[in-house]
Image: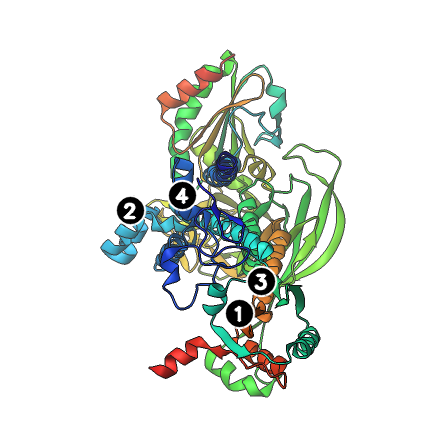
Amino acid sequence: MKKRRLVIRTIILLILGAAVAYTLYANFTKDDIKKVVVGEQAPDFVLVDLNGEEHRLSDYKGQGVFLNFWGTYCKPCEKEMPYMDNQYKQFKDKGVQTLAVNVGESELSVSKFADRHNLTFPIVIDKDGQVQTAYKIGALPATFMIDKDGKVVKYHTGQLTEEMIKELMEQVQP
Amino acid sequence: MKHVKCECGHVNPHGTILCEACGRVLQESEKEKQLVDMRYEGSARRSQTYNKTIVDKVWNFFSSVKVGVWLIVITLIASALGTIFPQEMYIPPIMPAAEYYEDQYGWIGKLYYDLGFHNLYSSWWYLVLIASIGISLVICSLDRVIPLWRALKAQRVSRHEGFLKRQRVFGVSEASNLDESYEKVKERLKAKRYNIREEDGNILAEKGRFSRWGPYVNHIGLIIFLIGGMLRFVPGMYIDEVLWVREGETKVIPETDGQYYLKNNKFILEVYDKDKDNQAFSEAIEEKGMVAKNYQSNVTLYKKKGETVAGQPPELEKVKDYPIKVNEPLKFEGYALYQVSYKLDELSKMTFTLGNKKSNESFGEVKIDLNDPKDRYDLGNGYAVEVVSYFPDFEFDDSGEPVTKSKVPNNPAFVFKMITPDKKEGEISFVAIQQTIEPFGDNEYKMNFSGIDTKNVSSITVRKDLTLWLIAFGGLIFMIGVAQGSYWNHRRIWIRRVNDEVWIAGHTNKNWHGLKREIQAVLEDTGIKEPEDQMQKEENKE
């Protein structure tokens, strides 16, 4: 009788405890769920760059991809752009592609910006926000490192230094 | 743990105060009292009797109503504290939260932020408090409802004299002609819908026992309600996103896996007209200036046809047109789109004419789409305008350079190159709203501002809530419990023959006046004396 009571009490407390633990866990990970998760397949997309060339993410299978979301009005984006360009030149023949996705500004603003900074990597514009929605983009700049199998291996928001960009690119180099 | 065997033969759990069967007072300390405490039928609250292992100790902690009340009080205080300053999600994103609170509210604001009150309702300790209330609710209820149920089930018709004597309503009466009176009493009790049980010439009349379960039904409702709240954290159960759509724009609806698109055809803001609408309000309208009557977005919902990759222009199939108004959301597949905010007259196009400053002669019009300006506008006859730079949301930065704050054309500015037959190299002019700067000296030509087109922007909340039915169900159970406990009373009347006397005792969980009136009506003309309210008697003595 006494033993049974202890068992029942223990079971009830465990169930209640598990419910509380799950709620706390879910509450603290709810922001992560909103992001593209590291370790998962990167959502595929097709966008056209400033030269009219189509870039499809899945076409870069076998290569690493440095995927950067940015805006011309975003200061940290502007600062990291020249670093990205330098590293793009270093890595493009070593199997790491750079794709810069603008968050839907006018073509004029984007191309003037690219000219001003002499950017050579492909810049695509996500006009209707589909790609940003797929990648759940919030703050800029946002950088995803995608490996040769199309998996997200790293996610970073905020400005990158040239050193960091180099390290990131080395990580996904096939 | 020892069980307690009553003289009547019934075996009670340890800690029982009144024998479940006969009502005999089992604890010495209770014997001195004039009236017994009937709250849980004198049953043994389990938590008070076992206290051995850690599990028992945790159980006992949550079983205490005192602890439960404190948890509620602390939660109330915490909830109130969270409303002193706005929560983080409601502050404008102009600076980091850490700086914002101190900047706006001084040292109290800093303290508020440091203590984590800026995110109070999703902080771990707040959730732990709410969860503790839930646990307390479950354990308090279990610990009381099971002994109560046992005691009510085990109760016998014949109750011990000591039990009857200590009831609030109690009386002793001489008995003459008892058999006849008994029949009358029974009939009247039946007419009043009492269940009657008889044993050795003693009577137990009982009704409304189910009212005793009211509080526990109510608690079950609360627990269901809490489970509903918990489910909101389960991915996919609850979605709350905001979507801004300009008039004429089609955008993918977030959290629909790219399956649904929304086009904003028109945003409408209507205000009350003091001449046309109800005259009674004309004064109020005059005082306030403008009173909104309707916020409405006329939208078209589209579904994507086939599989496309993000970024590809999707093939869209129209689902329906719908006017979204406040409280009249567009509903589809478990999603609801609510009108939540708006922005009127966002600039969409600006028109300029190229003119000669001196002669005021005009050489053509340039209409610039602010969301997609071209880099060159040809006006013919050797006249053209090139857009050298475009700043949709212009300001000067710290170093005096023109920059844009965002991609939204709130305050557009341009650097134009005006090419004319006599100035083939072009003249440079910086043009912002009500501002023209000529950085390379005086120009001969000028871009004259001639008009704007605007568009409204609707803000739509995308909401999906699969927990709502469970929360509503919990609320319903809650109310059933409240009604059950409030509108019915659990009444019992004991009639017992002791030698040549009739002992009558009555108990109810509330509304003693009603019980006494019923007893009065039942005993009328039977020769049995009406029992007295011992509590009132006591008061009258004093």
Q: Position of residue B8 (x, y in %)?
A: 53, 54
Please, which residue is most extreme toward the front here? B499
Q: Which mark is residue B114?
A: 2
- According to the image, label 1 marks what residue? B507
Asked which secondary structure carries label 2, the reply is helix
Asked which secondary structure carries label 4, the reply is helix
Q: In this rendering, does residue B268 appear at all? A: no
Disc number lying in front (1 or 4): 1
Identify which amino acid the numbered label 4 is placed on.
Trp
Identify which amino acid the numbered label 1 is placed on.
His
B271 above or below B521? Answer: above
Between the residue at mark 1 and the residue at mark 2, the CA separation in whole angstroms equals: 56 Å
- According to the image, label 3 marks what residue? B158
Q: Residues within 10 Å of mark 3 (few under 14, many from 20)?
A: many
Q: Are marks 1 and 2 on the same chain?
A: yes
B407 above or below A137? Answer: below
